[in-house]
Image (spheres, coloured by chain):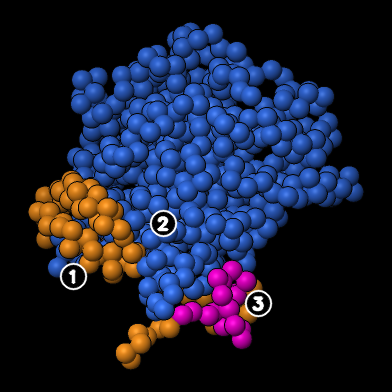
Chain colours: A orange, B blue
Amino acid sequence: MSEITPDVVRHLAGLARIALTDDEVSRLTGELGQIVDSVAKVSEVATPDVPATSHPVPLGMVTRPDVPGATLTQEQALAGAPAAADGRFQVSAILGEEQ
Amino acid sequence: MSDTTGSGAAPVGPASPADVSDLAALDASALAAKLAAGEVSSVEATEAALARIAQVDGGEGGIHAFLHLAERARETAAAIDARRAAGEQLGPLAGVPVAIKDVLCTLDMPSTAGSRILEGWVPPYDATVVARLRTAGLVPLGKTNMDEFAMGSSTEHSAYGPTRNPWDTDRIPGGSGGGSAAALAAFEAPLALGSDTGGSIRQPAAVTGTVGMKPTYGGVSRYGAIALASSLDQVGPVTRTVLDAGLLHDVIGGHDPRDSTSIPEAWPSFAEAARAGQREGALAGLKVGVIRELGGGSAAEGAEQGFQAGVLQRFHEALDLMQTAGAEIVEVSAPSFEYAIAAYYLILPAEASSNLAKFDSVRFGMRVDVPGGTVEDVMAATREAGFGPEVKRRVILGTYALSAGYYDAYYGSAQKVRTLIQRDYDAAFAKVDVLATPSAPTTAFRIGEKVDDPLAMYLNDLTTIPANLAGVPGISIPSGLAPEDGLPAGIQFMAPVREDARLYTVGAALEQLLVDSWGGPILGNAPTLG
């Protein structure tokens, strides 16, 4: 069932925003292949008549009264940021140069 | 049964305020009684814990249970002493020191979840459980070591180095909450908080000779617990006795409107449930189910399932004691449990890959700058540098399990297995009051033994994962020392959802029978440290 190749790992790492090294891609290709082969056994018993469970103790839709309450101040929210300016989180360019 | 602990039992001596090491050795309930009676101050208890930490935690070969110590522990303790002196009515654990797993947010201490990516991060709020500790007058000592983002069974995946098992410092203390369990076993703290996603409270308890309780899912608030897998995570107590666990659960448990999965119902007192277990006849008529697929069958079947012989031996001896005290042992079958690890290692990585997306180098934590790079380049470089190998493995596995074309085959199927496991529990609890298994398949393994073999590491969670998948509560208490290696083993009890109190009663009853048979607590046999 496993189709884990180095290209698949590179693609997944791109989706997960992790800049893996070539060594890591190579090691993860082998490890993920083994793990996926091992966990694929779930399909043996997951027949169409069995409903899925996403939550162990379902409570339904939980809401609270729509009343303003205490929140973090702007300073508190920004206190842990690697960089902030003018009361906002500061990041590098969000678009490439060609855009 | 006289050799149950494997060597002559030497219970920890009676405490004397003049001797800090004896004070540090007190159970929380005994310490709380002395505090209430004015025989000991909270400052003295806190100083005793800090002295013990200074003695055994640091340096080459030290336990390394703590990542960070509270700067104001003495002041916090002094404030409690002052309130007590002023005649204020305080809660039952007021003045008792407590260690906090680093996965829980604390306003006054860094909260790293064992990860480099959060190094030095101080949250702008307290986790609800931490706030409740403070309100109840407990004294936070510091933050305990853990596998990075709670991904692991040995604490070797901490970015800050492994914690060592006080029973044998070449061995792991379990994981992910190895720091909390080791702090208890090494008498560095009388109480600790843990979190349990697939056994991270119970398995460390088993391999360190301590007590660990995973409450019913929704029984304890997850607000401010850095999320690993939100449908599995649960915060709970790590202690040296069942009564202490009940006392701590009473402080941290109950509905929290800030957690939408928190059960909005009242709970009974778990300390009272534990005290009920200490009374004569507590086990009479109790039906205890042993699970054929998890060590409940023959010794040969158990060995085939991966259980160490001595772990199984202590498990069955504990059941014999319960039977002698009036419990009935019934064998049950849970055929879907065979698929639990596979389902867990799809559901957990899927949820973790989503939860860990928040570590984006923008709002908190580390940032690795990429000259001329876009924000996405910075994110990818930061996550590459900030995450350890196990976190990368699971995030990428989860991304795969959730990707288009594979979702139904993997994540969807795993959720169906979850239903089947719940049905197995329902069928079993129709016949018995509690289920019992060994808490972990083996005693503590050596540091380095499994760290490069993820599948072997994952098998440690064989006995603990089903409870997380079904949301049921589970407690681990010491069952004795395995004869072949002299290391602690644990017995786990599980009860239906919302029946946590039953576990405290049954656990306290068996604990009393075992401690009587050993002539003292199991930790009295632990080697001297420092």
Residue type at mark 2 is Phe
Q: Chain of mark 1?
A: B
Quarter of the figure that contains the N terminus of chain B: top left
Q: Position of residue B452 (x, y in %)?
A: 31, 39
Identified by mark 3, the residue type is Glu
Residue type, numbered disc 1: Ala
Residues marked 1 and 2, same chain: yes
Query: In the structure shown, which secondary structural element does the residue marked by tag 3 occupy?
Result: helix
Prevailing secondary structure of the magenta residues: loop
Which span of residues is magenta-colored?
A77-92
Residue occupying image coordinates x 25% and y 45%: B340
Residue B54 image offset from top left, x and y in percent: 69, 34
Instruction: Indicate left or right for A7 with B24 as reference.
Output: left
Q: Residues within 10 Å of mark 1 (few under 14, many from 20)?
A: few
Q: On the rendered structure, is B112 left or right of B379?
A: right
Q: Are marks 2 and 3 on the same chain?
A: no
Q: Is residue B303 magenta?
A: no
Q: Is residue B237 above or below residue A82?
A: above
- Contact (Cβ within 8 Å) of mark 1 with mark 3: no
- Check the image and report above or below for B86 versus B413: above
Residue B134 visible? The answer is yes
Measured in 3D between alpha carbons, the distance from the residue under mark 1 to the one under mark 3, in whole angstroms, is 40 Å
The quadrant the C terminus of chain B occupies is top right
Image mark 2: chain: B
State the residue position of label 2: B387
Q: Seen in the image, is B458 located left or right of residue B273? A: left
Up the image or down, B213 lies above or below B526; here it is below
Quickly name the residue at label 1.
B404
Please tell me which residue is depicted at 55% across the width and 71% down the height of the picture: A82
- Residue A12, picture quadrant: bottom left
Residue at the farthest front position:
B371
